[in-house]
């Protein structure tokens, strides 16, 4: 584990960026809202509720949205990449998009990794190459097919990503071996 908090580590890097004052202020607010995993404590819609409300906004809501988006992109690219997300699934996807942005156009496997993380996360449940091959190849919505070797590479690329990027900065890091749950409970409004 690193010494110091995740927030202080991210803020040190943020202050080295050349940003306009509003983007910088929003990025600071986003960093202050992160838990030990690097995930949002409260959703961004709540964090920026006053700024996004036309009745209380001091500048145009569209400009606020753009600035929040820019601040979020800046924070997500700070080391450790993949913070400022709602959960580990989004963190893995953001990391893949950042790390493989240039490679996905020339090496299809990186485009497959991003697609699977974005649209077919459930195919990773068993984390077995043959299960991934079967799920992808049997799907009518996936425009590509996998073989065993490609599936093994995809799983190893995903395994190299860090589902909990902020953990390296928390004092109670237990292990680098993560258990990825196969069931999730999401709250939508009050349900």
Image (cartoon, rainbow, N blue to C red):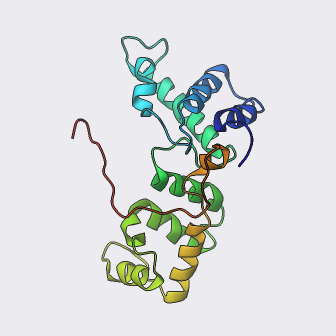
In the image, is 51 to the left or to the right of 19?
A: left
In the image, is 45 to the left or to the right of 5?
A: left
Q: Position of residue 3 (x, y in %)?
A: 74, 41
Q: Residue furthest bottom?
A: 148
Q: Does residue 45 sit above or below 54 in this rendering?
A: below
In the image, is 164 to the left or to the right of 86?
A: right
Which residue corresponds to the image point at 65% horizontal and 25% vertical from the top-left?
A: 24
Q: Residue furthest right?
A: 16
Q: Does residue 61 sit above or below 191 in this rendering?
A: above
Q: Position of residue 101 (x, y in %)?
A: 62, 59
Total residue callouts = 0
The C terminus appears in which quarter of the rendering? top left
Q: Does residue 175 sit above or below 75 in this rendering?
A: below
Q: Residue furthest left?
A: 191
Q: Does residue 131 sit above or below 117 in this rendering?
A: below
Residue 154 image-quadrant placement? bottom right
Q: Position of residue 72 (x, y in %)?
A: 56, 37
User: Do we see residue 116 in this rendering?
Assistant: yes
Which residue corresponds to the image point at 38% horizontal and 18% vertical from the top-left?
A: 53
Q: Position of residue 114 (x, y in %)?
A: 51, 64
User: Do we see residue 108 in this rendering?
Assistant: no
Which residue corresponds to the image point at 64% horizontal and 34% vertical from the top-left?
A: 7
Residue 181 image-quadrant placement? bottom left
């Amino acid at each position: 584990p690193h010494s110091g908090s995740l927030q202080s580590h991210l803020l040190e890097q943020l202050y080295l960026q050349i940003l306009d004052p509003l983007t910088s202020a929003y990025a600071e607010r986003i960093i202050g809202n992160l838990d030990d995993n690097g995930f949002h404590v409260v959703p961004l819609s709540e964090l920026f509720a006053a700024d996004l409300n036309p009745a209380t906004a001091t500048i145009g809501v569209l400009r606020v949205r753009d600035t929040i988006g820019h601040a979020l992109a800046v924070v997500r690219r700070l080391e450790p990449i993949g913070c400022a997300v709602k959960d580990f699934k989004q963190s893995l996807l953001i990391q893949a998009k950042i790390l493989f942005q240039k490679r996905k156009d020339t090496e299809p496997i990186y485009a497959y990794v991003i697609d699977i993380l974005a649209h077919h996360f459930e195919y990773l449940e068993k984390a077995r190459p043959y299960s991934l091959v079967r799920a992808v190849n049997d799907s009518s919505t996936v425009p590509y097919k996998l073989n065993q070797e490609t599936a093994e590479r995809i799983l190893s690329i995903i395994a190299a990503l860090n589902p909990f990027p902020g953990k390296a900065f928390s004092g109670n890091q237990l292990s680098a071996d993560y258990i990825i749950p196969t069931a999730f409970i999401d709250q939508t409004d009050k349900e």
